[in-house]
Amino acid sequence: MTPIFENLWEHYIFWSVVVSLVVFVWLFHHSFWFTSQDGEKLPNVDDLKLGVFPKHNDDMRLEVAWTVLPFILIVWLTYYSWGPLDAMWTSPDGGVHGNECEDGQSSNNRMDSAGIIESDCYHVIEITGQQWFWSFDCLELETTLCDTGTDSMEVYGSVPVLSLKKGETYLANMTAIDVTHAPWFQHLGTKEDALPGQQTTLWLPISDTMTTESMILCAEYCGDAHSIMAAKLVAHN
Amino acid sequence: MRISRKKRLLIGLVLVISMLAMPSAQSLPGGISGVQESGCNCHGAVPSDSVAGSIEGLPDSYNYSEVYNLTLSFEGGPSQPGNVNQGGFHLWASEGELSILDATTQLYNANEVGHTEAGNDQTSWDVIWTAPATDRNVEFVLHVNSVNGNADGAGGGTSGDMWSKVSVSLGGPIEILEAADPFVVLGVLILVTFSLLVITLAYVFYRKDPDSFDWDNFSPWLADWLTTTDHKKIGTLYFVAGLFFLGVGGIMAMIIRIQLSVPGNDFLTQDQYNQFFTLHGTTMIFLAAMPMINGFANWMIPLQLGAADLALPRINAMSFWLQPFAALLIFTGVFSGHGADTGWTGYAPYSVSEATHSGTTMWAAGQILLVASSTLTGINFLTTMAVMRAPGMGWMQMPLFSWSILVANVMLFLSIPAFGVGLIQVYLDRVIGTAFYDIAAGGDPLLWSHLFWYFGHPEVYVVIVPSFGIISEVIATSSRRSVFGYRSMVYALAGIGVVAFIVYGHHMFTSGMSPTLRFVTMLTTMLVAVPTGIKIFNWLMTMHGGSLVYRTHTLWALGFLVTFTLGGISGMFFPSIAMDTHLHESYFVVAHFHYVLVGGTVFGFFAGIYYWWPKATGKMLSEKLGVLHFLTAFVSYNALFWPMHRLGVWGMTRRHHTYFVTTEEALGSLPMEAAGWNMFITVSGFIFFFSNFILVFNMIVTSIRGQDAPDDPWGGWSFEWMTSSPPPAHTQYKLSDGTWGLPTLEDANEHIANEPGVMGRWFQRLMVSDEESEGASN
């Protein structure tokens, strides 16, 4: 889990607990306080009568209150979730990840307290999904920046490996040969569909604190060997 | 417009020809494959028994990925003295890969091989077949063409040309075939369930009158059920169908859970698992939830509106009878082991690719029937609500359950055409080779996702909104109060109905859709919290100052408030896109939608069943069994789905037939304790599954020896409680003066019932007024 995710998660969990506490305390209080016993003559405060539309039981102030309060809460949550979006969807040029790196230039990326990563520039790689394996292409990048290979894993057998350098930021141009796939970079907390006949992009900012090895799984159902369409991401120094 | 006789004749002729032409196209994943029907693709002569083709080199059952040398040959054919018989062939293999050995043969694709120019005049050819790596039933179709008299004619001898077809089937390795086949398990369980249903029905019939239990008395009873247009009987049929498929979907869920109980399990192959989760989703949404909603609506809408029946009883019967046949189509592939394997979302281009099973075609066809059924139902309920409300019942005096069905049907009515269009495109792509989703021909990989979710998101609200209606009725009646904020409840329902159409993009946050659209749907998705929040707080406030009567339906309604709130809160995590990119397609999503669809929809249905059962059957359900059902189901349900949230955050992915835990901290895949939680989930799942049989048991026992139900057992105000329990075929209501007839609604409020608000006036302008329609009929 990335710092961005953990940050948002903790914030959302806080508000979830607040909302659940309000609802559940209210619910449990009312379910035990406003009860009646069998055999007791049931009170009929609203004078309910069969075949008569009952008296309105409403209070404008309360109803407005619980329209406005949740609205304020979601406005706040939207505002809070907005921040990391710039980092996710920054345009390929001139955004938080700068322009494409010149030869020999380093992205030199750094993470702020919210977990958002900024870089000087980025490198371009290519990812192609196919039933049922991933192909990585480093294009013209030197092997110190980006390397591909295969590795044997205990349960998945032979898997392709993408080896990227810590501190560097990559833009993956993705496409698929046959049907839709989606690489889930589990430790980058990110995924995006690789569509046949179209190109999608995905930012892969490899921070200095990134774990050395992590999994890439296919997250878009693609047929028979979907669950073992795996790859390994290695972050090297 | 008048169409001339000639034109009609011409149109008729075109239709007849197209119908005759259709069967020649065979439904294969690749589209038209005429070559398998018509034999060798170079000669169109007649088939003949005198030609005998053979495939040698095939084992009785293949070994995984083993390579086999096949010799294809033929004998016989037309004979003419002095000439030898020579010819060509075409071989198709449903699975595995064909390849060639020499220049006499050529490969069309991995499944098809034929002879070349060089191999044209032979009687035997050699090819190679590589067996599939998974357990499949393989079919071979060999066409051989025998030509006699090659020397005749300038064109190279097509005279004396006969062909013949040989089909061979082949199974996988023996030891796999002998293992318990989950499809057989599923089939047996479905048959057992169905038989129990039939036996129960027979027993109910026997109990009615033991002396006249014979076919002569039974057949009119059966005929009555098959041809009925009575809304109550159709409602019951819907309900029985819905409960039956709830059981079937549940069995599939249990088989899925057996597979996932331990990491690396091989109870199901990935291929089987794919079919099970596809059909679990399709069954639960379209064959269990939707029929149960229609069951409730069929029973209760006319009763709540004070009408005698629905507006269009025959259309109603038709919408029901489309469903069993649609169900048959959807399940057609399963029993041959070739069921739909696309997921209930059926994402193109996968759903039109050759990798999918042939059952996907039938799955699409079945759902097209369901689209038709839902559209007809929508027309019926909207018409009934527009024109058949009792005098005195304006739009804003309709009971909230009726309002929820109104909103659900408007949503369904506006969204389902998109789904229908998408399904027809997929069907045509698969059957006659159109190219809507053929990427190579310029098809759009995202079009299906847009069409599907434009329907799919309103659809999940269609499924939950009727439960809102039921809960509103149950909480108000059980609290002995009128529902808090009736008007804001209606506006919130309508608000959900509107918002439903502008949020679907959140299913596509990681799909490559335009970032602008994603951002817009992030904002609108957040908005869903507002109307649902209003509803939850209104329900809580309804209890305030009331006196809650604890019945089973009350318990289910309170349980609904807990689980639906939790499901709503977990739903708020998805519109935060930076979190969604991690949670998307993980078990967190699975946990969320089961919390709203089981904890919301199904719990609402259970509340509705306990609430209206006495009205519909005239028998009270046992409260003791009801409480036992609630307690076991509620606890096991939460134990079943709550841990899935954590599994999703850890990185367990949806639709993977298995998962692996690891101690390697570095890999960051699932930690060791994930295995324990999965086993816990499976055990809880089985308890939840079996706990629901308490309800079935309760229904059967009490309908045999239950107490008779009074007309208004819970003290509700709406019209359904004014009829007898059970109500007569043509509903009569007991009026306040003691006579029976159709009721008029009184209103305890100041405002005048028949003066609609702005929305009501706008709506009524669309309707034919009473005066006009009376004028027309006179």
Image: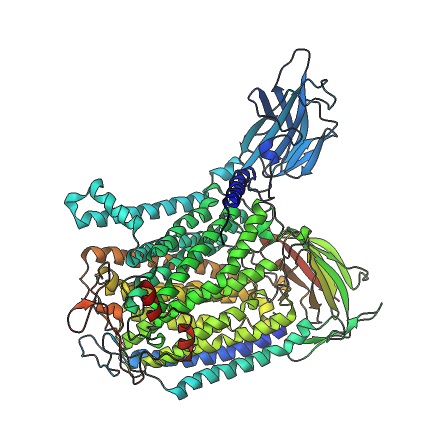
Q: Is residue B481 left or right of residue B459?
A: left
Near-viewer residue (B192 or A152): B192
Residue A95 appears at what percent x and percent y?
Answer: 73, 75
Q: Is residue A99 left or right of residue B596?
A: right
Residue B519 appears at what percent x and percent y?
Answer: 61, 73
Q: Is residue B143 left or right of residue B708?
A: right
Quadrant for the C terminus of chain B in the image: bottom left
Near-viewer residue (B74 or B230): B230
Near-viewer residue (B317 or B759): B759
Q: At x 21% / y 41%, what residue is drawn?
A: B216
Q: Quadrant of residue A111?
A: bottom right
Q: Quadrant of residue B314?
A: bottom left
- Residue placed farthest to the top in the image? B81
Residue B454 appears at what percent x and percent y?
Answer: 53, 64
Q: At x 48% / y 74%, what residue is drawn?
A: B569
A20 shown above or below A140: below
B532 shown above or below B730: below
Question: Does the rendering let one see residue B470?
Answer: no
